[in-house]
Amino acid sequence: MSKRSRSDNFPARRQKTDSSALGYADHSTKATSSSPRLKVHPYSRYEQGPAVLRKPMFLGDFSLDEQRRFCHDQRNLSFIHMDWTGDKKVQFDLNVAMDKVIRKNGEETKNEKLDRMLEWILSNTAKFHTKESAGKSLQCLSTDFVCFRGLLTQLMCTPYENREGWIVCATRFRNTIYLCAYETPERKAQREGETEMQKTMCSWGYKFEQYMIDGSNTSEGVNENEEYCVMMRSRLHDHSLVYGAEVDGADPALYKTPHGDLGAFVELKTSKEVTSEREHRTLHKFKMMKWWGQSHLVGIPRVVCGFRDTSGIINTLRTYHVQEIPKLSQDYWKSDNMLKFLRYFLDFVKRSVLMDDPQCIYKFERFPGGDITCTYLGHDPKWAFLPEWYYKKVFNS
């Protein structure tokens, strides 16, 4: 990819002025030149150089209640007690109390954007002070990127995922770039067109978690709105990251308070029983890739998968050690390439997102199997995602 000067596609970053109460410049113009592109293939574009994720550090946590309201507590922290060695034979009927399930409203959930994580940041600004800023008013978060883990996982899988596209919007505020995933039109149409059976199969995953969690009453319906989320800090080469993630639960024998990492936690998954070569390929090529990405990003060391039949009955529990998953799937993907691509993409974002203004949006888009484009949108309320209640208060509290 040829080198471009900043002025080729975007206006140069404007300097902050003393008169700016929020620390960003007034800006309303849009660039009209062609959008820069990032090549996804061949892998050789990003295979060189290091891409090691520093051990993720636990910053804090929060819960979402039955109405998805932010709760600055651990009310939804769950515990999962089991022997992690060998396969376990069980019989969990995932259809129990399916008529009592309370599902998420997909449209409302998408509209949350980064809001719940931003509420946590507002409540924990002290955690973002550095030695230099100690005792002073906070002026920045001292991190390069803020986002959710799911977005990072999707980006990491991009080199090996050609079936689906994605949209990520970015905005820079006080020198931190916030990233927010948006639905593609195709994914929105799929969600709105889901059959009852497809919705039921999605709910099977939540029901499996209920079976696994200590003290749960499986005769009750699951409220799928409730979540327990953690906030993590890490670094990928020269990119510092803060990200939120929903996690399933912890082993009570390993869980300690306080804790600096998620070594006690467990990721729970369901998958159809493998009865054909095609199903084996799907499990190892796509599912395990996402499992590894999700778990590695937060430092969760084990994944427990419940293998189900077509009727929704879990017959086998199998534990996978996260560090061993790349070897199990080495014929299909390489974990190093996933991390190197993430670094490569974040490099591109840093070069592209120049305006320091929480209402100024840059749209990164990948169509299935294609390259990545960056479009400068300027002040476009359709795509803006940092709420005023956040950017007017976070550095004035």
Image (cartoon, rainbow, N blue to C red):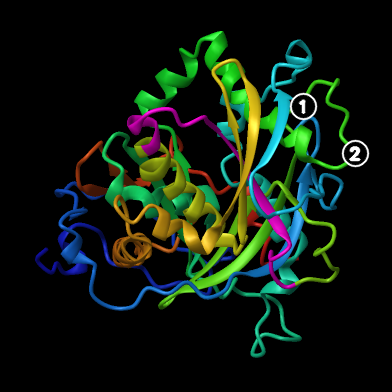
Query: Local crowd at mark 1 within 10 Å, few (<14), some, or many (≥20)?
Result: some
| Circle 2: residue type | Gly
Horizontal and vertical percent position of residue 84: 70, 54
Residue receiving disc 2: 215
Q: Is 200 left, or right, of 279 in this rendering?
A: right
**Vertical position of residue 104 compared to residue 361: above or below:** above
The residue positioned 59% from the left and 47% from the top of the image is 114
What segment carries the magenta color? 260-280
Q: Amino acid at mark 1?
A: Asn
Q: Considering only vertical position in the picture, is 59 above or below 222?
A: below
Residue contact between numbered discs 2 and 1, judged by CB atoms under 8 Å: no
Above or below 192: residue 242: below
Q: Is residue 350 left or right of residue 295?
A: left
The quarter of the picture where residue 38 lies is bottom left
Instruction: Determine the secondary structure under disc 1.
Output: loop
Q: Quadrant of the N terminus?
A: bottom left
Residue visible at 29% across and 34% down?
163
Left-right relation of 261 to 361: right
Report the residue marked by disc 1.
223
Dot 2 alpha-carbon crowd within 10 angstroms: few under 14, some 14 to 19, many 20 or more: few
Q: Estimate the spatial distance between the alpha carbons at disc 2 and disc 1, rounded to whole Å.
A: 16 Å
Pick whichever, 320 or 74, lies toward us.
Answer: 320
Q: Is residue 391 magenta?
A: no
